Amino acid sequence: MTAALEVSDLVVEIRRHHHRFRAVDHVSLRVDRGGALGIVGESGCGKSITLRAIMGLLPPAGRVLAGTVMVQGEPASADSPRAERARRRQLAMVFQDALSALNPVMTVGDQIAEAPLRVLGLSRRSAHARALELLGVVGIPDPRRRYGAYPHELSGGLRQRVMIAIALSSDPTILLCDEPTTALDVTIQAQILELLSDLRDSNGLTIVFVTHDLGVVGQVCDDLAVMYAGRIVETGPVAEVLAAPRHPYTAGLLASALDVDSHASTLVTIPGSIPDPMRLPPGCAFNPRCPFAQPDCLVSPVPLRAVAAGRASACLHHDRLLQVPHG
Amino acid sequence: MADVLLEVENLGVSFRADGGRTLRAVDNVAFRLAAGEVLGLVGESGCGKSTVARCVAGLLAPTNGVVRLDGSDLGVQRTAEQRCAVQMVFQDPYSSLNPRMTVRQMLRELLSVHDLVPRAAREDRCRELMSLVGLPVGALDGLPVQFSGGQRQRIAIGRALAVEPRVIVADEPVSSLDVSVQATILRLFEDLRARLGLTMIFISHNLAVVRHLSNRVAVMYLGRIVEQGQRDALFADPRHPYTRALLAAAPRLHQGRRPRPEVTGEPPSPVDIPAGCRFHPRCPLAQDICRREDPVPQQVHGDSADTVCCHFGADPG
Amino acid sequence: MSDANAVLVDEDLAPIAGRRSFAARAARTPAFVAGALIAGAVLLLALLAPVIARYGPLQQDLLHPLRPPSAAHWLGTDEFGRDIWSRLLYAGRTDLQVGVLAVVFPFCFGSLIGTLSGYLGGWLDAIVMRVIDVVLAFPFYVLIIALVFFVGEGTRGIYIAFALTDWVIYARTVRSATLVVRRLDWVAAAEGGGLSRRRVLLRHILPNTVSQAIVYAMSDIVLVILAVVTLGYLGLGVQPPAPDWGAMINDGQSFITVHPWLSLVPGLAVVLTGIGLSLLGDGLTDVLRPQ
């Protein structure tokens, strides 16, 4: 079965202050139709750039050096404008900060109606009706009144719902979410995550969810990819990866995560710090911070390899982790 | 409560909002803190926790109420000694340090103005402070722009410690940091607390962080403390529906898809606080009385410091 | 005590980034370098006028009026046979001197008022803002003509006129910057740290607001020179026979169709100085940012 989204060996280079570095280094992903993939990592790991590369929204300083992005089996490249448009029809993106992602001088209703009007070719009246419908779908109370509201008049949670409505308005099959709940309060976050799960159930949407929060990813996603320094270091079903990680970085993140249900007596931290992308350590980028590092870790960057059914890891010594108790 | 160090009573802060309306950011907030304790002040945006922090630290004048340290009132006009006694660590590491002063200049200014240490010993004290917050001595020569977010927070903590405070108010000190860096700064707080016996008010919207560091927890909603108590008791048996909602909504690693959240809707604007219990429009337990009467803090157990602000709070579950 | 010296947190921290000195950063900013070169060249030439000018500025040679550029007179001569190149240099000296000096008082006074107004607020701020509004409403040239009437002609009138009117822009600029900075956390931390208001103003606010005033001062010098030139053109300001670019442009007016360089050359000098100082101002904006 064709995957809804398939990324192969993507390499994205960013130019900064006369230097170049690879923000995304040989990243491969696959999401099946109706599936939900979570991409987790800290700042600078390349997760947002990956999403933007898929969407075709790289900043001017960035460019795709290599790799392919296949959307519903069709290659999506910037070379042919037709392929470009076809890609954008299938994809929609939800951003982190709704206030800066929304046009401040347009009513939210008009912004939602924009895609149906201009892309789908609906009449003005139909687009209006569709916008009202979408306001309801995303759970905004009193849609008729809210149609004429401006973004700054709405609360953060409502704005985020509006963004999701805009994303849905072009009838996408794949929803790319770039930290959509990071800026929201925790009770609102729960509601938005619930909304995304509902949309997935009702519309059969495929979701790619980027976040730095391991606790959030389990609520929406089936599968998980962990990124570090521009590479994917581990993949697998969410519950399995969180219960039994096969990469020391994932294990470190899990160990240092605080649990609201209990208090650990001491806080475990990952030693060292995230490397400067322009000065990556030789070999595996994580090796200076890794408790299991061996001399062979310094030789060359480690590719992602299958370590069990449906699980992959970019660690040469992943079996060391099996001996460590988790959970 | 043994040895109350910090006491806040009937604290209220109102602002004038557009259209002549009043914004009641903080309303009737009261809590007590013993020496060496950490109070975790938790709540979502707009609940007033940062406003409370600024009042305690003397950076904002409350409209009513009193802040007491060791039994004596602390007004907004504080003496140098009173100012040093309560120090704040701010949320944004990128705006909490003067970009044009080196770390050394920053620290020495405080040391000399308050004459805490004789001039000859000031350099040593600066080095000591650096080592206390886990930075190399070379950091003293640096300007803030040379440091990462986590390092800047360490510097900010060092600055707070330089004046030998009795109470530290930390306003979301790790919220702007990367997850793995958050853990290191929290560990720093833990270590400092153990080493120096710090008394702290730790503000966060993140329940897991609050749980880790605090002895007591106070939950705020729309300017009111809706529940406060000993940490373990509060987390094991939350009395207020909002506390339960926060706990239910908190991200958990191994939960997977969770049941539909009970608390719906958004918090109203602090300019338009609902009549009766301010939480009633979103509360799954709301009854008639909740729409009419504003509940007052009631004692939960025998300890008068543990309170809940709900008509049904005293009942179990 | 020695225990406290042990490093508390045992992990390696991110390396502390290096810092480039002012000179290094300045050298990497194209606008700054270009501006400094141009303005610096103009300044140097003006300063060295007595040394490099080949003739005195007032030295007439009535036998050789209105000559085109030649080996003896690099830019030719004017209607009195005076060497244009020498006059240009001396005029530059005068104009630059007036330009810089006229800006000093408004810069200092305006920045001070702006800082106090922005930081203290209240009635002081209200009064200052109203005064600024009144001053801004006043047409500058009307004021200067009136002043010249009272004070007499010459550069004194210019200095006084600028002192009275030019400070308001600095006050406004610095006030806006102060309003922004005083809300920032590091100022709150300074106040919370028990530092006196004076210290907070001088060490925590002013260094972070004054850079905008410095940058504006660069373009202000250009504006003053233009005003002096205009006044010279009108016959006010620097008095003949002392050379002044404005007066030179005016003098050359009658000959503009036959000997255009008489007006063109001082005009170009003004333009060049203006470009140099503007570029310098632009470059300073980048260099003064704490990077």
Image: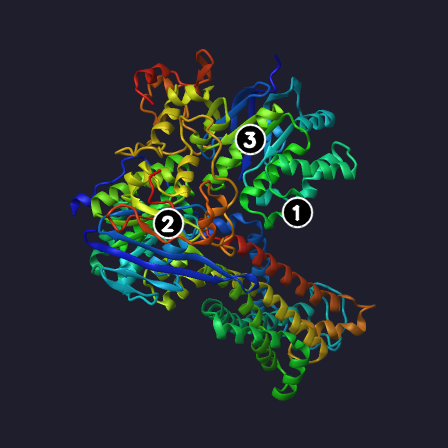
- Mark 2 chain: B
Of tags 3 and 1, the one toward the viewer is 1
Residue B21 appearing in the image: yes
Determine which quarter of the picture holds residue A299: top left
Q: Are marks 3 and 2 on the same chain?
A: no
Of tags 3 and 2, the one toward the viewer is 2
Residue at x 35% of width, y 61% of height = B58
> What residue would you read off at disc 3?
A196
Number of other residues with Cα within 10 Å of mark 1, as a class: few under 14, some 14 to 19, many 20 or more:
few
Is residue C165 left or right of B299 when viewed as pictured? right
Residue C243 percent across, percent down from the top left: 65, 75
Question: What is the number of the mark on residue A145?
Answer: 1
Q: Nearer the viewer, residue B89 or A19?
A: B89
Question: What is the number of the mark on residue A273?
Answer: none
**Label 3 – label 1 distance at C-alpha:** 24 Å
Residue C65 percent across, percent down from the top left: 76, 74
**Label 3 – label 2 distance at C-alpha:** 33 Å
Residue at x 21% of width, y 47% of height = B196
Where disc 1 sits, the SS reads: helix
Q: Nearer the viewer, residue A147 or C262?
A: A147
Determine which quarter of the picture holds residue B256: top left
- Mark 3 chain: A
Residue C121 percent across, percent down from the top left: 48, 70
Residue type indicated by callout 1: Arg
Residue type indicated by callout 3: Leu
**Label 1 – label 2 distance at C-alpha:** 34 Å
Q: Residue reaching furthest front?
A: B288
- Whether label 3 touches label 2, CB < 8 Å: no
Residue C17 appearing in the image: no
